[in-house]
């Protein structure tokens, strides 16, 4: 059974963890550093240009955004990392992300986005260590692969697999630009939710 991705619609945005609704459907969460291409990947998954707001300024997703995709909830968490925002705002995002993961929710799958062009970043390692410790099911989407040649993609995947301590079969090389890996991410979402 496949999800009808083209039915995707924005539901609601929340700025505080305590305001989040009770989960009533399977949930797929999207996490990653600011500027990793979360909104672009989400849009590509659902085949829409602007369901999730894409910005040239990193860190524009400042709240937790909920989308309904054919009865599955896609949860877009704020990017963590270098976004040029105040310390207080960064703390609010950290509390928001932490608050989300502390709740009793149906964590069917966490899609953790990592830029394939970079060495493993501390924040990515921390997030993946957290997901492993909590026993949450996750897949690592290696983004922006269109910027590298195929051999370089494979080399970077092997390197990141080692640096992040994640087996290669738990990683998918993706590009929101070309659609590379999108069907594989969809398959994993469907396996986790349907």
Image (cartoon, rainbow, N blue to C red):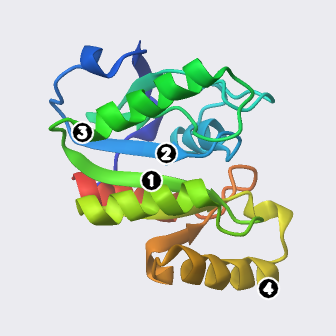
Give the quarter of the figure containing the N terminus. Answer: bottom left
Few, some or many C-alpha atoms within 10 Å of disc 2 (few <14, some 14-19, many ≥20)? many
Asked whether residue 51 appears in the rendered view, the answer is: no
From this view, report whether residue 38 is shown above or below residue 168.
above
Asked whether residue 48 appears in the rendered view, the answer is: yes
Q: Residue at x 52, y 32 (%)?
A: 78
In this rendered view, identify the residue nearer to me: 188 or 120: 120
Few, some or many C-alpha atoms within 10 Å of disc 3 (few <14, some 14-19, many ≥20)? few
Q: Which residue is mark 1?
A: 111
| Disc number lying in front (3 or 4) | 3
Q: Which residue is mark 4?
A: 151
Mark 2: secondary structure: strand
Side of 177 where 46 appears, left or right: left
In the rendering, at what x and y percent does residue 176 appear? Answer: 68, 50
Q: Which residue is mark 3?
A: 102
Q: Residue at x 49, y 21 (%)?
A: 63
Mark 1: secondary structure: strand
Marks 2 and 1: in contact by CB < 8 Å? yes
Q: Which residue is mark 2?
A: 31
**Would you identify the image quadrant in which residue 9 lies?**
top left
Q: Residue at x 61, y 36 (%)?
A: 39
| Disc number lying in front (4 or 2) | 2
Marks 4 and 1: in contact by CB < 8 Å? no
In this rendered view, identify the residue nearer to me: 114 or 148: 114
Mark 3: secondary structure: helix
Q: Residue at x 67, y 47 (%)?
A: 36
| Disc number lying in front (1 or 3) | 3
Marks 3 and 2: in contact by CB < 8 Å? no
Side of 18 where 181 appears, left or right: right
What is the distance, in whole Å, between disc 1 and disc 4 at their CAs? 24 Å
In the rendering, at what x and y percent does residue 154 appear? Answer: 70, 83
| Disc number lying in front (2 or 3) | 3
């Amino acid at each position: 059974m496949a999800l009808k991705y083209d039915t995707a619609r924005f539901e609601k945005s929340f700025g505080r963890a305590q305001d989040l609704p009770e989960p009533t459907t399977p949930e797929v969460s999207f996490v990653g550093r600011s500027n990793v291409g979360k909104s672009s990947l989400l849009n590509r998954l659902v085949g829409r240009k602007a369901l999730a707001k894409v910005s040239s300024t990193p860190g524009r997703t400042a709240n937790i955004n909920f989308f309904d995709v054919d009865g599955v909830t896609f949860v877009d968490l704020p990017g963590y990392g270098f976004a040029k925002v105040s310390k207080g705002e960064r703390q609010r995002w950290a509390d928001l992300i932490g608050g989300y993961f502390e709740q009793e929710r149906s964590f069917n799958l966490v899609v953790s986005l990592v830029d394939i062009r970079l060495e493993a970043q501390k924040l990515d390692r921390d997030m993946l260590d957290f997901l492993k410790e909590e026993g949450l099911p996750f897949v690592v989407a290696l983004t922006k692969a269109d910027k590298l040649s195929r051999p370089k993609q494979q080399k970077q995947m092997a390197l990141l697999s080692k640096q992040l301590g994640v087996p290669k079969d738990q990683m998918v090389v993706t590009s929101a630009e070309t659609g590379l890996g999108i069907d594989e991410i969809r398959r994993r979402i469907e396996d986790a939710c349907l």
